[in-house]
């Protein structure tokens, strides 16, 4: 029973260290918008200098209570497209025509050498001149677009009150037409206090020429139509880091100050120089060297410093130790060059769970970020919201806040308090079991004849 009494006196919560105590420092995260839910932050040079893990597993976003947020590290080539842009399309009005006669409509168009429509003449069959006709449609020329067309934006001359249906067709040569969307609904309603507008038409297929034909409802004249064009992701610019080294047998050795995703290397000399180099790297001072690139001729000649181009690595490396080896085997009398490491910053995507403000904790020998399935989530959301959707931006604050400091770089020691707590829990469980067994035995003895 003494063990059980001790167990009840253990303040369990007091032994639980917060997640922040596992990291060296943190940077505040500033969100571009408060309600986006998903964010992306570009890692800075300071983050790479502070990270210890070769996989950047010790880079972790935290909420206001220090709890880890679901996050995933994406490379610089990840498909995070920029916001789409719009471009006006040439617009030609078509004459009124009978319902469901779109297949009989003949278009005679004049085009320039680039395929752009300059004039349109329309012809209807003779029996189509009589009877009820719907308002004419519109021909759109998308032949000049250099990027994929993903949607159309309609703008009426006078914002009307309307709810109508259109038929969207496409053609690559103005002769054969195919249906892109048989029923497109457009809405423009106003109740005096609020306005409901649906002027965007998402496209499931592309075409050089498009035509919008009315199906139901009265349509006013179109003022303009804009093409929504997907903007491909612009690659993040290259960053460089120059290292000073020391002479070793046959070359020079360098130490990187952080876990940079090195994808290019270059040699920077102080004067005219032409040497055939090879580059090797390793992650620890006692690990074997790994060949990265070379041999290649690195030169620097003339007052204008004409130089050889950087060399691309076959595989990105975060190694801390780097070595230049001259093919001649001797570097005596050679002015020590600098090793220039080239990298493009990566992007960390995270979900904003818990209470703000959020922070990015960096540097730990015992904490490791769990990779969340956020790339799959991004792909799913783009199917729902369009290819232009992307997480909102978050930026790192300029001033880092020290958390556990260098203590976070020490491997986790055996937690005697936790072991004692578990021992007390086991002791208490045994005590409770023994007490129950004792009561059961006494009860059986009392009931015996």
Image (cartoon, rainbow, N blue to C red):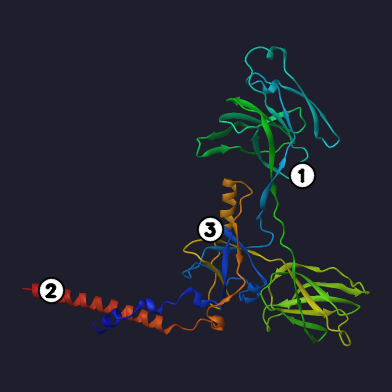
Query: Which is more foreground, mark 2 or mark 3?
Result: 3
Residue 131 place in picture, x, y as percent = 63, 12
Residue 156 place in picture, x, y as percent = 64, 33
Q: Secondary structure at mark 1?
A: loop
Residue 417 figure quarter: bottom left
Look at the picture and state if 37 lies above or below 338: above
For image coordinates 29% across by 83% down, the residue present is: 6
Q: Residue furthest front?
A: 192
- On residue 34, which mark appears? 3
Badge 3 local density, few (<14 within 10 Å), some, or many (20+)?
A: few
Residue 251 place in picture, x, y as percent = 82, 83
Q: Secondary structure at mark 3?
A: loop
Q: CA distance from mark 2 to mark 3?
A: 65 Å
Along the line of sight, the residue nearer the viewer: 187 or 262: 187
Q: How many marks?
A: 3
Residue 270 place in picture, x, y as percent = 86, 80
Q: Earlier in the sequence, mark 2 or mark 3?
A: 3
Along the line of sight, the residue nearer the viewer: 305 or 12: 305
Q: Are marks 1 and 2 in contact (CB under 8 Å)?
A: no
In the picture of the structure, the residue carrying the numbered disc 1 is: 146
Along the line of sight, the residue nearer the viewer: 67 or 54: 67
Q: Secondary structure at mark 2?
A: helix
Q: Residue furthest left?
A: 449
Q: Earlier in the sequence, mark 1 or mark 3?
A: 3
Q: Are marks 2 and 3 in contact (CB under 8 Å)?
A: no
In the picture of the structure, the residue carrying the numbered disc 2 is: 443
Q: Are marks 1 and 3 in contact (CB under 8 Å)?
A: no
Q: CA distance from mark 1 to mark 3?
A: 35 Å
């Amino acid at each position: 029973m003494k063990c059980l009494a001790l167990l009840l006196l253990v303040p369990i919560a007091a032994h639980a260290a917060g997640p922040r105590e596992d990291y060296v420092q943190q940077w505040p995260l500033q969100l571009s918008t408060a309600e986006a839910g998903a964010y992306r932050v570009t890692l800075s040079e300071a983050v790479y200098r502070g990270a210890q893990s070769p996989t950047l597993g010790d880079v972790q976003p935290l909420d206001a209570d220090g709890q880890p947020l679901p996050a995933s590290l994406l490379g610089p080539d990840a498909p995070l497209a920029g916001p789409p842009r719009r471009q006006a399309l040439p617009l030609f009005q078509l004459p009124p025509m009978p319902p469901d006669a779109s297949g009989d409509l003949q278009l005679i168009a004049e085009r320039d050498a680039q395929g752009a429509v300059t004039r349109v003449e329309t012809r209807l069959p003779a029996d189509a001149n009589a009877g009820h006709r719907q308002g004419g449609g519109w021909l759109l020329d998308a032949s000049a677009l250099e990027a994929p067309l993903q949607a159309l934006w309609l703008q009426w001359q006078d914002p009307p009150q309307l709810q109508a249906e259109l038929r969207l067709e496409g053609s690559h040569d103005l002769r054969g037409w195919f249906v892109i969307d048989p029923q497109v609904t457009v809405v423009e309603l106003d109740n005096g206090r609020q306005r409901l507008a649906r002027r965007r038409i998402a496209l499931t297929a592309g075409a050089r020429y498009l035509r919008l034909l009315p199906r139901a409802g009265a349509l006013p004249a179109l003022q303009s139509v804009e093409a929504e064009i997907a903007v491909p992701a612009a690659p993040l610019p290259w960053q460089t880091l120059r290292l000073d080294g020391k002479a070793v047998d046959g070359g020079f050795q360098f130490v990187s100050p952080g876990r940079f995703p090195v994808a290019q290397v270059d040699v920077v000399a102080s004067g005219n120089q032409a040497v055939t180099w090879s580059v090797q790297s390793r992650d620890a001072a006692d690990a074997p060297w790994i060949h990265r690139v070379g041999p290649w001729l690195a030169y620097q000649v003339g007052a204008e410093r004409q130089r050889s181009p950087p060399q691309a690595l076959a595989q990105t490396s975060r190694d801390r130790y780097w070595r230049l080896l001259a093919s001649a085997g001797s570097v005596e009398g050679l002015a020590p060059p600098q090793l220039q490491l080239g990298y493009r910053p990566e992007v960390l995507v995270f979900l904003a769970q818990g209470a703000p403000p959020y922070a990015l904790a960096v540097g730990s020998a015992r904490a490791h970020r769990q990779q969340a399935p956020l790339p799959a989530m991004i792909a799913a959301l783009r199917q729902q919201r369009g290819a232009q959707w992307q997480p909102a931006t978050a930026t790192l604050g300029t001033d880092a806040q020290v958390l556990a400091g260098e203590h976070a770089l020490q491997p986790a020691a055996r937690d005697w308090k936790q072991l004692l707590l578990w021992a007390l829990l086991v002791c208490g469980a045994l005590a409770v079991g023994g007490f129950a067994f004792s009561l059961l035995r006494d009860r059986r003895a009392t009931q015996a004849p």
